Amino acid sequence: MADVHPPKIEIFDVPAMNNTDPKGIDRQVEQFRTEPFGLYMARPTPGRRQFHYLESWLLPELGLRITDFWFTEGHEHDQDFYLDVVRIDRRGNQWHATDLYLDIVLRDARGLDVLDSDELLAATSADLLTADLAQHALNTTFVTVEGLASHGYRLHDWLRTKNIHLTWQRH
């Protein structure tokens, strides 16, 4: 049985160099960068054993948050990027990302896994997510999986077809 919870919301406050996580904890950001296609964020992750740093891109047109977790030795995962299916609203210099439950674990050039469909169904059944938003989450996931598969599961190859060029500290 999936954990039933309301959609998680995260706030990215560019002028304040702050990221408010879904639990309401404010995190200092080392770098924000706004591009025509989205917002880049890089910050340490104090208090996390599994990883010590993360880089994320919010891509509103694609409905995705793409993250590179810098795993701590002994906690590595077989993944290159973690894609959250999200709805992104921009309010001035603040970006709000609402997690729509579905996630994609990408192993660049090797494959992917779609996660948390049980959470999406549980939230929709509990009226925590509208049917329209659930359908949007599914469509976003289908389009993303199809795009990645048609480009050999190479994230940057797929994104280039959409005129999106992501830069990372490690990649």
Image (cartoon, rainbow, N blue to C red):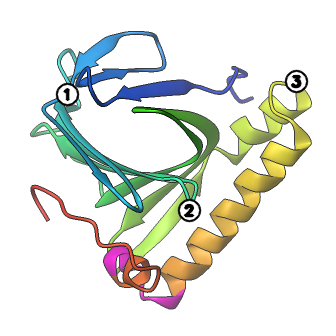
Amino acid type at mark 2 = Leu
From the image, tell me which residue sits under label 3. 126
Where is residue 51 drawn, in percent x and y?
A: 20, 34
Q: Which residue is mark 1?
A: 29
Rendered position, 6 above or below 79 = above
Q: Which mark is residue 53?
A: none
> Badge 1, how many Cα within 10 Å: few under 14, some, many 20+?
some
Above or below: residue 122 compared with residue 141: above
Magenta segment: does it hold 128?
no
Instruction: Single out the residue that lies furthest toward the front.
Output: 92
Left or right of residue 139: residue 34: left
Which residue shows up at 52% across the image and 89% down it?
150
Please name whichever residue, 51 or 84, is drawn nearer the observer in this view of the structure. 84
In-front residue for pair 129/38: 38
Q: Residue at x 79, y 30 (%)?
A: 123
User: Do residues under tags 1 and 3 come within 8 Å of each other at their CB atoms?
Assistant: no
Q: Report the Cα–Cα distance between label 1 and label 3.
A: 34 Å
In the image, the segment drawn in magenta is: 150-156
User: How many numbered marks appear?
Assistant: 3
Residue 38: x %, y % from top left: 40, 54
